[in-house]
Amino acid sequence: MSATGLSAEANGKQSGASRLRRHTALLVIVMAALIVLALFPSFAQPYYVTLVLPAFAYAIALLGFNLLFGYTGLLSFGHALFVALGAYGAAVLTSKLGIKSFELILLASGLAAVVVAIPVGLLAVRYVRIFFGILTLAFGMLFHSFLFKFYNITGGDTGIRVLRPALFGNEFSDLDKTAFLIGPFYYYCLVLLVVLGFVMWRIVHSPFGLHLTAIRENSRKAEYLGVRVRMFRLAAFLISAFYCAVGGVILAINTGQADPETAYWTHSGELVFMTVLGGFANFFGPLVGAFVFIFLKSELMSLTQYWRFFLGVTLALIVILFPRGVMGVAQDLWSKVKKKQ
Amino acid sequence: MTSFFDILLGGVFHAAVLFLVAAGLQLVFGVQKIVNLACGSFYALGAYFGITSVNWALAAGLPPWMFLPVLIVSGIVLGAIGPAIEALLRTIYARDEAFQLLLTFALVLMFQDVLRFFWGPNPQQLSNLVTEYGRLSIGTFSVSTYNLLVIAASIVIAVGIGAFLQRTRFGRILRATAENREMSQALGVNVRWMYTSVFTLGTILGTVGGALVVPTAAASLDMPVELVVEAFAVVVIGGLGSMRGALVGALIVGLMRAAAITFYAELEILAIYLVVIIVLIARPAGLFGKPIE
């Protein structure tokens, strides 16, 4: 990923004072964004609020995805596998096993994803670059055809219904579906995003995260320095799988259905799309990418039946002209403004 | 015995078409180092355009048995989109692989709607033209002559590509460029022109593949994304960038698929991908690929 350069945060050469100022500015922006998101259901139409839920889901999934892609330098084209594991985890637990506790569903689905990710990751991290991408794609499609073909277990192409979970033991049975989703569930997911976002922030800024960055920049050199490259890659893979599964659980509860398309390779492609759209060199890029993508897609879908074409054009433009994504453009504008001052 | 024969022929027919697409993928990967996700889109475009061309040709009064040449010509004509797409890809040759893969993914999304725009959302079919060529019977076995012709065409193309790469001057320059781009440029090879022609050739292999399959199967909007999955399996089994690999990989995938459909339909793609994973574990670079770092 050397072509796009590193964001300043991994640079480590800034003086303490400027770092503090930077962090303060960042904190202000994050707090402002959180306040807007917290107040959003009170002023926006319910339709737009229901759009934020998948954005939350993808934001969480992409936090994990980008640990692997942006920080470790491994491009997976099969992470929809773990999103689908989360979705089907929620489906099986709620409609087949009658488990309603959302906390339990998150934990169980996340752990299931990690368990699947261990063998998949062990094989995949032996490769880098395009081979890693193709192998992960293969595993994703393997899972997709399992979901699609084994009708008795997975419901085939219709999938499995996902029932409403209980948040901290409360089912909110007096609320209808939309009220539940844009009410308690919305705030629960917002808090979840903040918590998991904070955890990821700590991960990428920990020695562990710096190891991953070192592996991305020069894996051979990192190995000489005693970094166990494959172990670290595997660890990043497992964490990303957990995050993607949590995102998948939220997605499935939002739509009320887990279907095999969630595991299809084009869905994996969308994950990469969102990450690059927001900017993978920046910690917040994937989060921005998730929101921009969801709203862009919904606007395009309401305008034309050929929305895929315009999504494709957007992606091509981003890749060719703005490879650092929305956050890259924002950073450039910001530094231009600063220079003028 | 008859069913064994059917599986064999069905598998080889599928392999013949898969080989064409995979060969295009390999050619482009070998020279440009780009894994083209849009190869499936070229295939689907070839299929749809093939239907339209045959219908035009029939309306213009051409005899029905001419449909095979018409299909091949229509596939070659579609190669005209190659240079335009290569010009788009040219902007990112120097970039990270992630961007190259994503740009071809963008093409997949765009083509999906281009097909929908011109041919609508419903699957399209060529009415029973295959029967024009009749069936060939040997003893108790009977096969569609068209399928045999496609297999023969694919073999001719395979041999042709092999001879082209090994024996001609252009082929030698092409292989030299694939091996070391800077050195060939220093020796005066027009790399830009080379890239454009290789990509166009890769495109034509895909579109002709799609055109040839369409008399036996409907063209649908799922075609591009479904084919990519199989074409990827082929090149991974055979080894990225290897033509021999594309041939062997296509045979393995084609036969596996035909066998799985007959014996246990649930296993179709599953079986193919299990082979992919086994090959990758046992021989990371594929059967004929160069060892990877």
Image: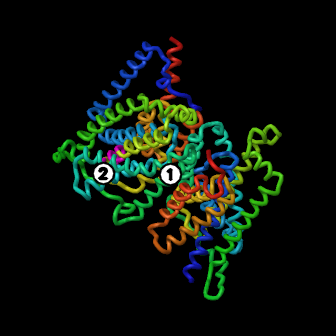
User: Is label 1 in contact with label 2 (beta carbons under 8 Å)?
Assistant: no
Bounds of the magenta span?
A246-253
Q: Amino acid at mark 2?
A: Ala
Magenta span contains residue A243: no
- Residue nearest the viewer, comparing B246 with A13: A13
- Residue nearest the viewer, comparing A208 with B230: A208
Residue that label 2 marks: A90
The percent position of residue B278, horizontal first and vertical second, equals 53, 59
Element type where label 1 sits in the image? helix
| Horizontal relation, residue B46 to residue A180: left or right | right
Image quarter (top left, top right, bottom left or bottom right) of the C terminus of chain B: top right
Above-or-below relation of A196 to B46: above
Q: Residues within 10 Å of mark 2 (few under 14, many from 20)?
A: many
Identify the main secondary structure in magenta.
Answer: helix
Whether discs 1 and 2 lie on one chain: the answer is yes
Element type where label 2 sits in the image? helix
Residue that label 1 marks: A137
